[in-house]
Image (tube, helix red, strand yellow):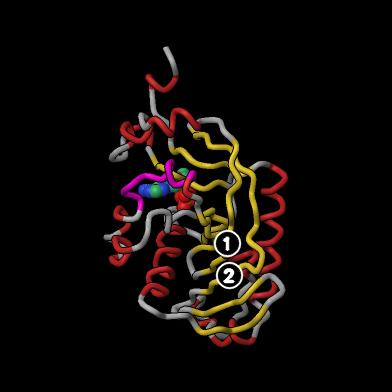
Amino acid sequence: VPLEETSLPLFFGWFLLPGIQDKVRCTSMDFLKTLDTLEAFKKHLPDFTVDAEKEVDLEQYFQTNGALHCTTKFCDYGKAEGAKEYADKPAVKELYGSAFELSLSALFVTPRTVGARVSLSEDQLTLWPADAEKEAVSVVPAAATLPAGSRAHVTLGCAEGVEPQQTGFDLLEILALQQEGQEGELVEEMELGSLAYYGKGRWLLSLREPVSAQACFSSLYG
Ligand code: 2AM
């Protein structure tokens, strides 16, 4: 009996290949290391800690775990709504095990998560669940009006006690602000790109050169 008929995975997604995982982790660490030394960041420190006198070491603040990936569909072994339908999509079956180049276009940091925005191509969007953004509406109401693929991200770290799925919500919040016409307050031109502040501890670094990340479309049973 094929595995797919016995149970569904925890999630489907693109798994970054080992070499590029190291590169992305390093880029993220460099960014965090620079961010927490910036005067602008220190000015907004109360967003991150109740004790504004204390410094925050962002590299310690966020915990990382597991292989870097971009979740397409969280299936929860079949318990999640639409899991079976997703697994049965022709594109999912056809492209399972195939290699892709993901474009990481921005890094973002909030008091809860740090992540990379993934800008999906037309081909990659065939693997994106139609309701991924709508599922986030209870947390980010404007998510329903954002284009498909807006939620696509790689979680790079979560603060203590924060659920990983928060990273996608944090990204959607920033994109919703942009859609409303808020540009964010341009804070600094960094080597990696331009850094903007969106209030409430939300920072977005738009990468000058998107990072092209090789990834395999697959699933995790966990
Ligand atoms: P992430 O994609 O933001 O990192 C296993 O828990 C993976 O599935 C994690 O990568 C996690 O978040 C994602 N995940 C967990 N619960 C989820 C949910 N309810 N909706 C979407 N993705 C979820």
User: How many other residues sit within 10 Å of disc 2, few (<14), some (14-19) or many (≥20)?
Assistant: many
**Mark 2 close to ligand 1, CB under 8 Å:** no
Q: Residue at x 57, y 64 (%)?
A: 106
Secondary structure of the residue carrying numbered label 1: strand
Q: Is residue 124 magenta?
A: yes
In this rendering, the answer to whether 163 lies above or below 48 is above
Range drawn in magenta = 123-132
Q: Is residue 38 left or right of residue 159?
A: right
User: How many other residues sit within 10 Å of disc 1, few (<14), some (14-19) or many (≥20)?
Assistant: some
In this rendering, the answer to whether 186 lies above or below 159 is below
Residue highlighted by disc 1: 105
Percent position (x, y) of residue 190?
68, 77
- The secondary structure that most of the magenta stretch takes on is loop
Q: Residue at x 51, y 56 (%)?
A: 119
Percent position (x, y) of residue 40?
59, 86
Tag shown at residue 137? none
In this rendering, the answer to whether 127 lies above or below 103 is above
The image quadrant where one finds the N terminus is: top left
**Mark 1 close to ligand 1, CB under 8 Å:** no
Quadrant assignment, res 6: top left
Secondary structure of the residue carrying numbered label 2: strand
Residue highlighted by disc 2: 206
Q: Residue at x 59, y 66 (%)?
A: 61
* Amino acid type, label 2: Ser
Q: Is residue 192 magenta?
A: no
In this rendering, the answer to whether 17 lies above or below 169 is above
Percent position (x, y) of residue 64?
59, 53
* Amino acid type, label 1: Ser
